[in-house]
Image (cartoon, helix red, strand yellow):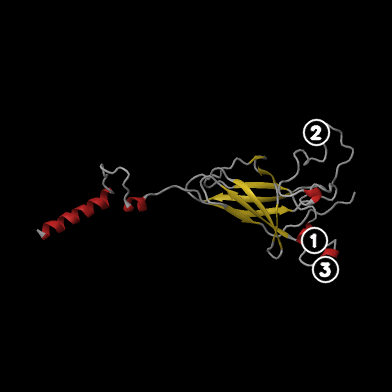
């Protein structure tokens, strides 16, 4: 009797190994730990890398940068990004008026396309790693097509993106590391930008840039 029981257990174990878990007709919702562990679910695996960037320059358009004219993380009113209104004649073009931007590369080394990726946070840090502001997003563009980023990152096909955002009106004041630096108006203080992407089928992807500086002013 004991021998028969042992043979029965051995046969069941072999069948489970070869054919997987038997279906339980009485409990269709029943799961099998062995089957779940062997299940191969395709998932994306996205990583981001910093390419280049700057903090902009608002010397010829005071009030248009972050912190200027009461502008906060909500950004500027619609239509205020262009130096001249569409359909009007511009007699003066402000040369020192550039929004901030960073170029990033997203690479997917997983087994499925990442979907619905979008920028949900742009945070500015000073050289000491202190958070100074959350800056408003303007647009995310695919540099290969100049089209708005559609949120998809396919396996093996990197996407290089330009993230335009509202830079600090006065990066010197915002990024100064000491009171003594406040009086040195011609000294540029670096900052770093941390861009966070969310996705429909992937955890948040965070990309930290290198040191960024304002765009140098051009004398007119």
Q: Return the residue at label 3.
A: 180
Q: Return the residue at label 1.
A: 188
Q: Secondary structure at mark 3?
A: helix
Q: CA distance from mark 1 to mark 3?
A: 14 Å
Residue 60 in sight from this viewpoint? yes
157 sits to left or right of 123: left
Do the numbered discs 3 and 2 sit on residues whose CB atoms are within 8 Å? no
Q: CA distance from mark 2 to mark 1?
A: 34 Å
Q: CA distance from mark 3 to mark 2?
A: 44 Å
Give the residue furthest to the left: 1
Q: Count the labels in the image.
A: 3
Label 3 packing within 10 angstroms: few (<14), some (14-19), many (20+): few
Mark in the foreground, 1 or 3: 3
Q: Secondary structure at mark 2?
A: loop
Residue at the location (56% across, 50% down)? Answer: 107
Mark in the foreground, 3 or 2: 3
Q: Position of residue 52 (x, y in %)?
A: 69, 53
Q: Secondary structure at mark 1?
A: loop
- The earlier-in-sequence mark between 1 and 3 is 3
Q: Is residue 153 above or below residue 185?
A: above
Do the numbered discs 2 and 1 sit on residues whose CB atoms are within 8 Å? no
Which mark identifies residue 86? Answer: 2
- The earlier-in-sequence mark between 2 and 1 is 2
Label 2 packing within 10 angstroms: few (<14), some (14-19), many (20+): few
- The earlier-in-sequence mark between 3 and 2 is 2
Q: Which of the two residues, 156 or 36, is positioned nearer the viewer here?
A: 36
């Amino acid at each position: 009797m004991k021998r028969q029981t042992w043979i029965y257990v051995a046969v069941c174990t072999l069948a489970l190994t070869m054919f997987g878990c038997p279906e339980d007709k009485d409990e269709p919702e029943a799961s099998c730990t062995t089957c779940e562990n062997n299940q191969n679910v395709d998932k994306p695996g996205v990583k981001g890398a910093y390419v280049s960037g700057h903090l902009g320059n608002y010397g010829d358009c005071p009030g248009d940068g972050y912190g200027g004219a009461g502008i906060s993380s909500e950004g500027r009113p619609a239509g205020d990004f262009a130096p001249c209104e569409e359909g009007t004649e511009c007699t003066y073009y402000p040369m020192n008026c550039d929004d901030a931007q960073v170029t990033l590369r997203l690479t997917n080394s997983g087994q499925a396309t990442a979907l619905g990726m979008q920028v949900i946070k742009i945070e500015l840090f000073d050289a000491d790693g202190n958070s100074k502001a959350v800056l408003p997003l303007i647009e995310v563009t695919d540099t290969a097509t100049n089209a708005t980023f559609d949120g998809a990152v396919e396996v093996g096909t990197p996407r290089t993106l330009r993230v335009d955002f509202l830079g600090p009106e006065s990066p010197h004041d915002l990024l100064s590391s000491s009171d003594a630096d406040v009086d040195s108006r011609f000294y540029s203080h670096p900052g770093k930008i941390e861009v966070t992407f969310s996705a429909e089928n992937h955890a948040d992807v965070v990309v930290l840039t290198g040191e960024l500086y304002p765009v140098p002013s051009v004398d007119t």
